[in-house]
Image: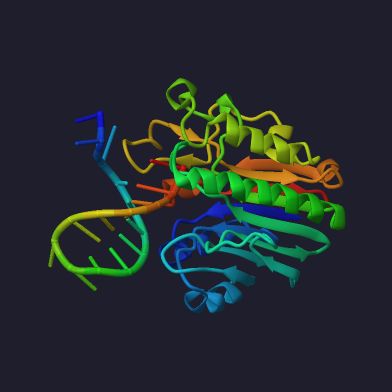
Amino acid sequence: MRLATWNVNSLGVRLPQLLDWLAANPVDAIALQELKLTDDKFPHAELAAAGYQAQCFGQRTYNGVALLTRAPMADVVRNIPGFADEQARVIAGTVSGVRVIGGYFPNGQAPDSDKFVYKMAWLEALRAWVAAELAAHPRLVLLGDFNIAPEDRDVYDPVAWAGQIHCTDEERTHFRSLLELGLCDAFRMFEQPPKSWSWWDYRNLAFRKNQGLRIDHVLVSPALAPEVQTCAIDKAPRRNERPSDHAPVVLTLRG
DNA sequence: ATGACTCCCAGTGGGAGA
């Protein structure tokens, strides 16, 4: 079984690239973030023609998440139950016996901003809910755009980024609290090339200079960890014309 | 360096992203 996550930065703009990528990378499930469209504009027909059914959770202009799967999904949940949120950031579903939770974590803007306060509250609510999901669904994957660079080795210039958004101690503590639930950062289960990033700023030739952050993650539950075969970032779509600023991350499970 | 790019909604600019 193969799963992926990709922040497409506008599904409207990126749909042709997504279809190309799925044709070359026939995953069983993919979590998408930053759809930037409402559900009435979701391209169900085009994705169905490519063999994917979709559960979407969109909104106008910002945010928006979806899960695409080949097999049907059950028990679909939108956003974090009990956490009132205007922003469409989470979609979960069960496919082929695996609980898949896709998330577009808040950016946070700056550590002294209201948006950072929201990010902290959101992360706390997520952790509590994921703990409950994990108890109910031992075979679980939490994946998406976390907007957190967990360690200095996930940052191209850790000195310049020290204390900056995505790299604060508070954010990293929240990331570790997810690991403390038993979840495992699948990417770090393997030897990886140094300077592996999942996001590069559009500005300043950042991709060409390989100046990026690893902020898109795939966390697997203890029951799934022994089945993880590979986890890799696919930089290829970042070389497209008009690319997303994020690259997909792909997980392969045995069986 | 208050920059850079890209998206959106707007509408001939501005917010947000990260």
The residue sitting at 80% across, 46% down in the picture is A221
Q: How many marks?
A: 0
Q: Residue B17 at x, y = what percent?
A: 44, 49
Colour mode of the rendering? rainbow
In the visual, does A183 lie left or right of A163?
Answer: right
Along the line of sight, the residue nearer the viewer: A132 or A183: A132
Residue sitting nearer the eye, A26 or A136: A136
Q: Residue B10 in the image: state x and y as whole percent.
A: 25, 69
Is A47 or A63 nearer to us in this picture?
A63
Residue at the top extreme?
A159
Residue A87 lies, in percent from the top left, at 53, 61
Q: Nearer the viewer, residue A163 or A208?
A: A163
Res A175 seen here:
yes
Judge from the rendering whether residue A7 lies leftward or rightward of residue A25; answer left or right: left
Residue A136 picture location, percent across and down: 86, 58
Residue drawn at point x = 57 percent, y = 72 percent: A47
Is residue A26 visible in this depiction of the protein?
Answer: no
In the image, A121: left or right of A10? right
- State which quadrant residue A73 falls in: bottom right
A50 to A125, vertically: above or below: below
The quadrant the N terminus of chain A occupies is: bottom right
Task: Tell me if A206 is positioned left or right of A187 in this view.
Answer: left
